[in-house]
């Protein structure tokens, strides 16, 4: 199917998306605004916890930090990376708790939460799920027209927000093309193609 962009209806309304790269020591955040296909940078940074703090104290810092960002910028959507268990189950549990603190802060602020696998985020930004953090940083800088490289945690958070916008835009194109709901469901799970 050939899609003529000049004849397309407006299918993506304005959204402010807060991307979160969770961590118990450093949580990156990035805010972007999307109107139709344009993506504009708003802000980014890191929430840093005290290494000497207990885990509950770190979670409180993350919750309060994300809550302040949500209160100030009023994002309509929050995109966050899913937990990936690699070598350490303990690290994965801490990461999961940091994610939970950020998600609760977003939900309490009225944001709709969406989760994405790290590989899907990298593929959306760089074109390959095996991209390095440096490649993600450079592509985020280029896509958003930033004068300098964002910090890695902030770049990952911005990449998550951009991935969310790309995914939602693609879903709306599919929805407007009269394809069936089963194909939309397959795409949302990250495996777009003909349903079996």
Image (cartoon, rainbow, N blue to C red):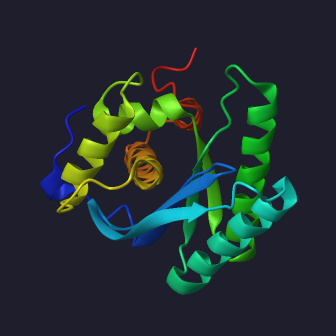
Q: Which residue occupies 81% across, 32% down?
A: 90
In the rendered view, would you say 150 is above or below 135?
Answer: below
Q: Quadrant of residue 178?
A: top left
Using the image as rendered, state which of residue 24 and residue 119 is in the foreground: 24
Q: Is residue 31 visible?
A: no
**Image quadrant in which you'd find residue 125:** top left
Of 149 and 99, the residue lying toward us = 149
The quadrant of the picture occupied by the C terminus is top right
Q: Position of residue 140 (x, y in %)?
A: 29, 49
Looking at the image, how many numbered discs can be counted on the residues?
Answer: 0
> Is 89 situated above or below 175?
above
Q: Residue at x 75, y 34 (%)?
A: 92
Image quadrant for the N terminus?
top left
Position in image of residue 58 (x %, y %): 76, 60
| Residue 160: x %, y % from top left | 47, 49
- Looking at the image, residue 113 sits to the left or right of residue 157; the answer is right
Residue drawn 13% across the image and 56% down it: 6
Point 59% across, 56% down: residue: 27
Single out the residue that lies furthest toward the bottom.
72
């Amino acid at each position: 199917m050939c899609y003529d962009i000049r004849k397309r209806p407006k299918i993506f309304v304005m959204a402010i998306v807060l991307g979160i790269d969770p961590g118990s020591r450093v949580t990156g955040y990035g805010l972007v605004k999307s109107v139709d296909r344009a993506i504009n940078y708003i802000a980014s940074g890191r929430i840093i916890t005290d290494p000497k703090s207990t885990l509950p104290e770190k979670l409180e810092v993350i919750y309060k930090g994300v809550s302040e960002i949500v209160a100030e910028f009023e994002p309509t959507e929050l995109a966050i990376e899913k937990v990936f268990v690699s070598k350490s189950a303990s690290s994965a549990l801490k990461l999961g708790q940091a994610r939970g603190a950020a998600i609760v802060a977003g939900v309490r602020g009225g944001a709709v939460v969406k989760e994405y696998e790290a590989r899907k985020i990298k593929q959306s930004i760089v074109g390959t799920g095996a991209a390095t953090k440096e490649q993600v940083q450079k592509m985020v800088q280029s896509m958003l027209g930033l004068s300098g490289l964002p910090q890695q945690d902030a770049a990952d958070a911005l990449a998550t927000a951009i991935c969310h916008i790309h995914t939602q835009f693609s879903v709306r194109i599919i929805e407007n093309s009269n394809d069936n709901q089963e194909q939309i469901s397959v795409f949302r799970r990250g495996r777009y193609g003909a349903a079996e």
